Amino acid sequence: MKKVFVLFFALLLSVCTYNNVIVAQGPDSPEDTSQNATVEPVTTPEVDPEVENLPVSGDPVIERSAHQVVKKNFIDGGWIFMSIVLVCLILGLAIAIERIITLSLATVNTKKLVAELEGAIVNGDIAEAQNICKATPGPTAEVLGEGLKRVDDGIDAVEKAIVSNGSVQMGLLEKGLVWLALFIALAPMLGFMGTVLGMIDAFDSIQKAGDIQPSMVAGGIKVALLTTVFGLITAIILQVFYNYITSKVDSLVNSMEDATISLVDILIDNRKLPDNKTAVAE
């Protein structure tokens, strides 16, 4: 969490530094005016009207990259609401990346795991099966290991241990998704709030001026809508990650359920439960 806030403040610092550089290197800087002051006035010859509108080869054409455009729009949209939306994006991405890494590490080959457990159970070595579960990372091996610990207590105890531990593992897999959903809903609402406040400020400027000028209205509306755009972009990005994580959790849960059903069937078929042992003895 500390790294997230450090990244956030570093980004704000870079934005402010970039803004100062742009202002210092503007076309109306003192260097340009001093150079223009030394140039002696010359008489301009008559130019053909068709050639007059053509661009002069000596004038530099400023082309901004996508990164520069995003920075400019971020600054124009107002740092208060834009910074809050940026915080939602950074925290949401941090949670999403952490969940993706955790779920990727928790994914195992359940068919191979069940096959290894079946081999140990067929040989009558329940302790070896428990060691296999301990050595295998992930929630599936954890649930199967808890079930194997209750083998001596009967099938009901095994199923109860699997269900109880499965609920705990489900909660661990879905950890952080509530906050991610909050940021998805919060980002566009903050954008809309910034838009409404920007519109109010634009109409307040019109009221003070006593006259409606198209440039004043258009500029105020443009700045107001920028917060909505950034809020919607943030929500879209986080929503994609949320859906991917949800599908990953569902896949892990399904594989976990299949593995637990297979384990119970293996224990019953190989008569490793007390009820079956009693029946065989009789």
Image (tube, rainbow, N blue to C red):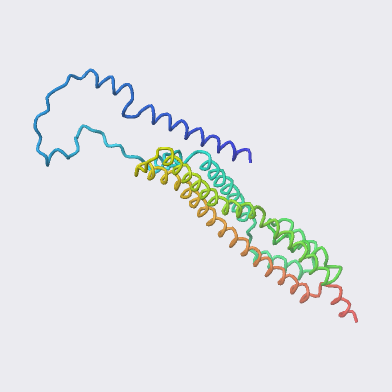
Q: Is residue 29 above or below residue 199?
A: above
Q: Is residue 68 left or right of residue 81?
A: left
Q: Quadrant of residue 138?
A: bottom right
User: For this rendering, which residue is in front, 196 or 5?
Assistant: 196
Q: Is residue 57 left or right of residue 4?
A: left
User: For this rendering, which residue is in front, 47 or 130?
Assistant: 47
Q: Which residue lies furthest to the right in this view?
A: 282
Residue 28 lies, in percent from the top left, at: 32, 27
User: For this rendering, which residue is in front, 99 or 225?
Assistant: 225
Q: How many marks are shown on the rendered structure?
A: 0
Residue 237 lies, in percent from the top left, at: 51, 53
Residue 43 lies, in percent from the top left, at: 12, 24
- Of the 4 image quadrants, the one containing the N terminus is top right
Q: Which residue lies furthest to the front in this view?
A: 210
The structure residue drawn at horizontal position 62% and vertical position 56%, both measured from the top left corner, is: 103
The structure residue drawn at horizontal position 85% and vertical position 71%, both measured from the top left corner, is: 154
The structure residue drawn at horizontal position 63% and vertical position 61%, both measured from the top left corner, is: 249
Q: Is residue 248 above or below residue 265?
A: above
Q: Residue furthest bottom?
A: 282
The structure residue drawn at horizontal position 38% and vertical position 26%, both measured from the top left corner, is: 24
Q: Quadrant of residue 58?
A: top left
- Of the 4 image quadrants, the one containing the C terminus is bottom right
User: For this rendering, which residue is in front, 232 or 140?
Assistant: 232
